[in-house]
Amino acid sequence: MPETVETIGIYAFGYNRKSLKSAKLPSKLKSIPDGIFYLCDKLETVNIPPTITRIGDSAFTWCSSLKSFPIPETVTYIGSYAFEFCASFDELVIPESVQAIGRNAFYGCLNLQSISLPGNLKAIEDYTFYQCTNSLQSLVLPNSIERIGNYAFGACNSLKNIKLHNNLKTVGSYAFSGCRSLTTLDLPYKVDSLSDNFIANSGVKDLVLHSVPKLSESPFTDSKIEDIHLHLTDSSYLGLPVAPVTPTTMPTYSRTTNSEWGTLVLPFDAEAESEQYELYEAKELIDETTLKLKRVYGQVMAGTPVFVHILPASKRGDKYELSITGTYSVKDLSDEQGYIISNDKFWNIQDVRGNKKVYCAPFHAYFSGSLTNEAHQFGLSHSDATTDIRVVEGSGRPTYYHLSGRTTDGAQRGVHLVRSADGMVKKVLK
């Protein structure tokens, strides 16, 4: 093919099933057109110039003799069905320049053993690796992945391990269906819902969750699930409302902190005493620096605000390590009176009903009631004589808040909050 050629029509060499074994594309070509080598099942090698930025849809579909394909670092897009049924592929390195890969791109690459994915990729589209059946045993998704589409890894029979990172938010229906060698699946905390049949007919018996997800109508249909392990940390999302998770759920909350005291609202029932900790409830706010606590015994119901005292047995060096296991249940705060502090936001619960969603992390403050002495929970600091509300972002000039969540012009009479230059919000009684 002459080097002066700059464009080639779609399906230009498609359906050549007899004589085409190798091809060299011209150096001025910028895009590999759709279907250019469609069903060229004798094609073994292709020379790709470093000018290519796009690989079109179905460009190499059914090129079953193509064993390797060096993708230039100029390519930014790989089209849908681009390498579908390239059954001889065993290894594929996708350069960091690639920002998107279309659906079904590697569908039916039966002998693919390893693939390296770029760090800018946002999604694994529908059916991308469907029926990569025989050899793909392990896969690490880049941290940039936010969505796994429907059937994305369906029927990957040999897949034993897949590493999912914390930016992942959505897992589609049948995403891991038929992954018979996959026995454990660890879903990151931003995954806030479980789609229909996402592990149907797979080998997954243990499901590890780091958030309380919303459930579809049939997330565990045709699955082998025996245990669901719910691990909550300060990074966990607690979706409201949420259906009970079945079958057996084993929820655990863990935290590493510099302080032996903290506050706690768990979404599951827990024992009030152990060798690691003691739990207390707030009885009375005496003044701005004095709080009267009462020891809690027996079982603490889900959603109950308590103070936690981490005992010396849980101290590791200069850190305190807390772990609480209990029985799963949910408290939906959306119909309650009171306030929530979560991350850097302060809400009146009544203001977030309707279309808004609120996530209240376990160690963030929850206020019940609307008047001066009705704050049932707030963070506790023993470093000085103040009582602090934790994990609220801010710096610079102080900002004052009434307990309703409204900002004020400055310190006013009564209980209010102040966001100071060190980022801490302090409860002040004037």
Image (cartoon, rainbow, N blue to C red):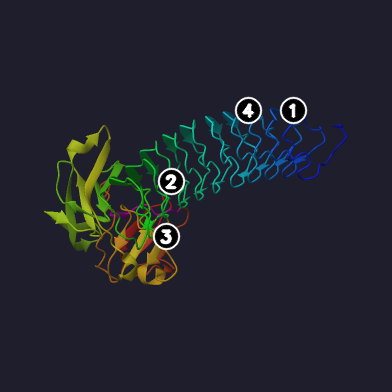
Residue type, mark 2 in image: Ser
Name the residue tied to disc 4: 67
> Outermost residue, front direction?
18
Q: Which quadrant of the view contains residue 290?
A: bottom left
Name the residue tied to disc 2: 177
Name the residue tied to disc 3: 345
Quick one: 149 or 143, which is closer to the camera? 149
Contact, mark 4 vs mark 2 (Cβ under 8 Å):
no
Tell me the distance, in whole angstroms, between the alpha carbons under discs 4 and 2.
Answer: 27 Å
The answer, for residue 32, to whether it is visible in the render is: yes
Quick one: 211 or 214, which is closer to the camera? 214
Please name the predominant secondary structure of the magenta segment in the image. loop
Tell me the distance, in whole angstroms, between the alpha carbons under discs 2 and 1.
Answer: 37 Å
Name the residue tied to disc 1: 22
Q: Which quadrant of the view contains residue 260?
A: top left
Residue type, mark 4 in image: Lys
User: Tag 1 or tag 3, which sits nearer the N-term?
Assistant: 1
Q: Secondary structure at mark 4?
A: loop
